[in-house]
Image (cartoon, rainbow, N blue to C red):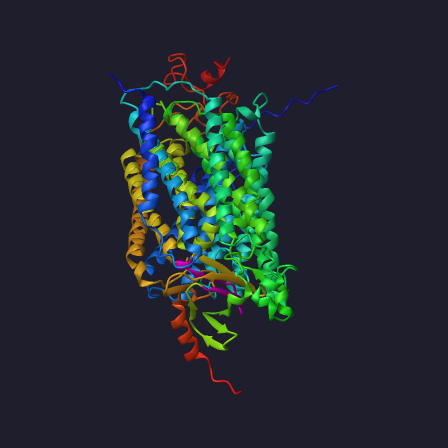
Amino acid sequence: MTIASPPSPSPQPLRLQPTGWLRYFSFSLDHKVIGLQYIVCGFLFYFVGGALAGVIRTELATPISDFVSRDTYNQVLTLHGTVMIFLWIVPVVNGGFGNYLIPFYVGARDMAFPRLNAVAFWMIPPSGLLLISSYFIGGAAQSGWTAYPPLSITTPAMGQILWIVSVLLLGGSSIFGGINFIATILKFRQPGLKLMQLPMYCWAMLGTSILVVLATPVLAGTLILLSMDIVAHTGFFNPASGGNVVVYQHLFWFYSHPAVYIMVLPAFGLVSEILPIHARKPLFGYVTMVYSIMAIVVLGLVVWAHHMFTSGTPPWMRLFFTIATAFIAVPTGIKFFNWIATLWQGRLALNSAMLFSCAFILQFVFGGITGVALAQVPFDVHVHDTYFVVGHFHYIVYGGTVFVIFASIYHWFPKFTGRMLDENLGRLHLALTFIGFNLCFAPQHWLGLNGMPRRVAEYDPQFTLVNQISSVGALLMAISTVPFLINVVVSMVRGTPSGPNPWRALTPEWLTSSPPPVENWKGAAPLVHEPYGYGGPAGVVDLNQASGRDLWRNEP
Amino acid sequence: MRIPSAILTLVVGMALVLLGQWVANDVNLLPESASVNAPVYDELFRVLVAIGTMLLVGMTGVVIYSLVRFRRRDGDTQDGPAIEGNLSLELFWTAIPAVVVLFLGIYSYDIYDRMGGMADLNGHGMGHQAELASVRESGPEDENRIWGGIAPAQSSGDVIPVEVTALQFAFIFHYPEQNITSGELHVPTGQTVELRMKANDVIHAFWVPEFRIKQDIIPGQPTVLSFTARKAGDYPIVCAELCGPYHGGMRSHVVVDEPESFATWVETNTPATLS
């Protein structure tokens, strides 16, 4: 009997994937490449969405419609909302940071379904381009990102159909991502790593992905019915054919309210990673943080009708959705108190990552307070569909997630590139964004209370001054991206080398080189049982001296 | 000697409460209140502002204090204390917000009830039918009418019915009893007006900021909305639901008159009828 000896390994290891910069334009299966693809791609769309916001604020600098035509204005506001939600925030906080970090956190070499992962990313650029190109072929959708029928049925069909197709593709991409995250977190954990030992971002992504998988198909089905009303003249939502428009609103918000948590929960997770490291303290109340994420997931699915308090909903529904909505403030509040407790008595490094996170806390608290107010039916009836709501949700999605995206970029840029971002430019970026943001959106609450509805190109001249203040704020926000861009480009080439672990962090992504190798860790993956084990008796392990492997070997 | 932190906390807490009360009562953020609903609404608004101000200023203060007080000095590489949690603290800040939120929910339910919102929404339902002026003299189409949810139906005698038609991009008001058709709404003070609203094309919304009422006007779903004006004046009617390119221009006025001048207006505008 002979035993065939295994073939000797070829001297040149077979390259399965392109290397160098080209891999960022390839169908790469590496979760780190895909994560960065999401982030950079999302950022490009952020500029498109920001430019559209610039058009809106320029138009609103004067009370008459004089900058763009009225049709164009409605196309611009529809595109602004759709681009910012579906092409910037959702892909970046889920796909971007999720892909980059989750395999590290569970101790895996890649996501559970790498090919599906690449497909999910590569659905985004074409659908984004399709959405934006609809503006040039016959005009984009003009019925707002909510696409309420009958308006969406009566406005030009071409733009609305292209909008539906691209949102369907983006929703599909989101579902693929969600399935992948659930499988990776539940099934790809290293042996010996328990669920309750995972970094908080894993829990946030698990909760988010559950919402994505449960809610997004409802949106997809709704939009398919809507497109049939448009092209095949069916009567699901068209009252002229016996349809019911309120049913569309129920179905739409069944996805689109959880969508807020799909944007915000990952941001909560990212903040939970950033704060302990820069405060040098354990994350306060790990267990309650996990339970509050899950409570937000459950409650988030049963609050949708608070968007419809003026749509003739029955009283029991108003009462139920008021209470359910207001109760979301409880688990959310727990998270904020826990973050503040994490800061308390810490040794806070006042760097850009920390300051952006703290700005997030302040702004989200304000957005949360106006949110609890909006949950009260009598209050909501007055300010529904006004600039008060515009101000409120920008405090949630911009103050809540975009600030966290910036904090995360300052925090993980050394891991992505091996170089530090410049702190002075970072703080300048923070100051400009913080002032610009509050100048832009805080006055809008007053506008709404006093009678300015949203989605208008013209308004009562008594609101001119406040609108101009808001527009100045928007201009500052646009300017604030300049120091950020300079910082990223210059630091990528000439930044201070960061070394593997510049923040002396304990989470697994820092226990490898920067940028990490394709297989994430050379040799065995570290088993981190206490991702937030900061503090304690000083001098047990000197983090400046120890390598990542020493750290996890020293675990008892 | 250092002042004990418990005393400082108490003083800060009292200052916060005073600040919240001051902002709620002395900073006017709302437009004029011109309907019977509006003062009730403003009461809720003041409570929300007071609680919100306390929370926002308090939490902002704690974050800024932490950033200053616990900032890392140069060259300090030590960690903070390894505090991983505190069950009683967690229970404390779960229970307090839960109680506040529950109180707010019950309070706003009460407010909403006082505004008439919790009246049987299917106001055309069996027992309630007679109370609704609109149903009394209506055809079968009104079977579908949905109660707007603000302001109670008064005894039918005092109610002024007005038919509102919303279309791109205008409101048309029709007074069935006098057969007046108008582009602006005229109502007297102190008398309940019942708007029976329908939309011809897309969803619109009827909003009078000074009355604190808003109701979507949904095609295929006739809706009733009542209000009672309190102060004479000229207030804007705003469409608050995106309805097309001229949405921002879809505005009208509600002119609130004293009953005598309203009677004059009715008289001068009633079209001559062939008798």
Residue A443 x %, y %: 33, 50
Residue A36 is drawn in which quadrant? top left
Residue A172, x across and y down, in percent: 57, 48
Using the image, determine if residue B119 lies above or below residue B262. above
| Side of B1 where A388 appears, left or right | right
Q: Main secondary structure of the magenta part?
A: strand
Q: Residue at x 65, y 22 (%)?
A: A5
Which residues lie in the magenta part?
B191-211
Quarter of the image where the N terminus of chain A is located? top right
Q: Position of residue A335 (x, y in %)?
A: 46, 32
* Vertical order, A520 against B181 (above or below): above
Asked if the magenta segment contains residue A35, the reply would be: no
Q: Is residue A390 visible?
A: no
> Which one is in front, A480 or B39?
B39
Which of A39 and A245 lies nearest the eye of the viewer? A245
Residue at 26% x, 18% y: name it.
B2
Residue placed most toward the observer, A324 or B35:
B35
Q: How many marks?
A: 0
**Seen from this angle, which residue lies furthest right?**
A1
**Magenta-drawn stretch contains B206:** yes
Q: Position of residue B3 (x, y in %)?
A: 28, 20
Q: Is residue A327 above or below residue A444?
A: above
A243 or A125, nearer to the observer:
A243
Do we see residue A130 in this rendering? yes
Residue placed furthest toward the left: B1
